[in-house]
Image: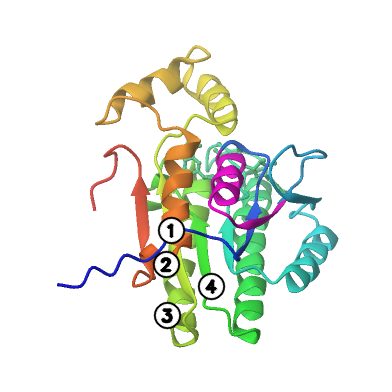
Amino acid sequence: MTLNAAPTDLTGKTVLVTGAAGGIGASAVEHFAAMGATVYASDIADDFDGAATYVRFDLMDPKGLDDCLAWIAEIKPDVLFNNAALFAMGSILEEGDLQQLDRLFSVNVRAFYAVMQACAKSMVAHGQHGSIINLASQAGHRGEALVAHYCASKAAVISYTQSAALALAPHKVRVNAISPGVIDTPMWKTVDAMFAKFEGKEIGQKKREVGEAVPLGYMGAPADVARVAVFLASDQSSYMTAQTIGVDGGNVLR
Ligand SMILES: NC(=O)c1ccc[n+]([C@@H]2O[C@H](COP(=O)([O-])OP(=O)(O)OC[C@H]3O[C@@H](n4cnc5c(N)ncnc54)[C@H](O)[C@@H]3O)[C@@H](O)[C@H]2O)c1
């Protein structure tokens, strides 16, 4: 029997990470760099302290998004970690609900899609057999009464991952998604505070409850997601495309 052990080494690969200043993004930058990749990072944050060339773009702003797409054409990534996103909660019956839809979809769906498209075009134009990794969520697999727009935006990520994977397969560009469960990042400060407001919980209570409810018994760490991203970026996963991988301690059974 021949063992065909493809390398996880990312030496010579150029990786783009969006949402790089966040919990999962920052860990992904460190993991890609540690595997030998040249990493380009972007976020809305003013500063970024990590192993990457950093440029600030506001993906909600049409000009910021356009500038980011032009930058992608310059850096020609082999790998995209498509990670920037916003979380929000509210009721379908609430004033301002449609504005919240527009805000979330402008980043989580429109900018997410435009960044993926720009990377795909660049990969195809330069004959790169690239890997695109989209950040979905366990929330994308099931609706929630007060989290409708975030859940729908992540369902869109899963669907676009499948469509893009099929469209790009003839070019040997792979497209997969990761659906994290509950991962201990700055986003959880927002999530916990919103559940406190909408469900009358104490600060910290929702976060504690969701961790205890995970079959493995605790919240995940950003590195748990980053290690799977390294696998999806590398030739170890060369026969995988159009998949959404749960990194959730057993929360969602597929
Ligand atoms: N933490 C979790 O439990 C969890 C669970 C499921 C899915 N996810 C997904 O994983 C990804 C990373 O999440 P995280 O927990 O690290 O969140 P985070 O809030 O720590 O990071 C998200 C990053 O996106 C950036 N961002 C937001 N709006 C932007 C804009 N307009 N322009 C540019 N950058 C912008 C933020 O500044 C932030 O640094 C997201 O796509 C999120 O939806 C997270």
Q: Is residue 112 above or below residue 202?
A: below
Q: Mark 4 is on which residue type? A: Gly
- Of the numbered discs 4 and 3, the one sitting upstream in the chain is 4
Q: Which residue position is annotated with label 1?
A: 8
Q: Mark 1 is on which residue type? A: Thr
Report, in whole angstroms, how far the alpha carbon at label 1 lies from the one at label 4: 14 Å
Q: Mark 2 is on which residue type? A: Asp
Q: Is residue 54 above or below residue 188?
A: below
Disc 1, disc 3: CB below 8 Å?
no
Q: Is residue 245 above or below residue 240?
A: above
Disc 4, disc 2: CB below 8 Å?
no
Report, in whole angstroms, how far the alpha carbon at label 4 lies from the one at label 2: 10 Å
- Out of 137 and 130, give the one closest to the viewer: 130
Classified by dominant secondary structure, the portion drawn in magenta counts as helix
- Of the numbered discs 1 and 4, the one sitting upstream in the chain is 1
Report, in whole angstroms, how far the alpha carbon at label 4 lies from the one at label 3: 14 Å
Report, in whole angstroms, how far the alpha carbon at label 3 lies from the one at label 2: 19 Å
Q: Nearer the viewer, mark 1 or mark 3?
A: 1
Element type at mark 4: loop
Element type at mark 3: helix
Q: Which residue position is annotated with label 3?
A: 166
Report, in whole angstroms, how far the alpha carbon at label 1 lies from the one at label 2: 6 Å
Element type at mark 1: loop
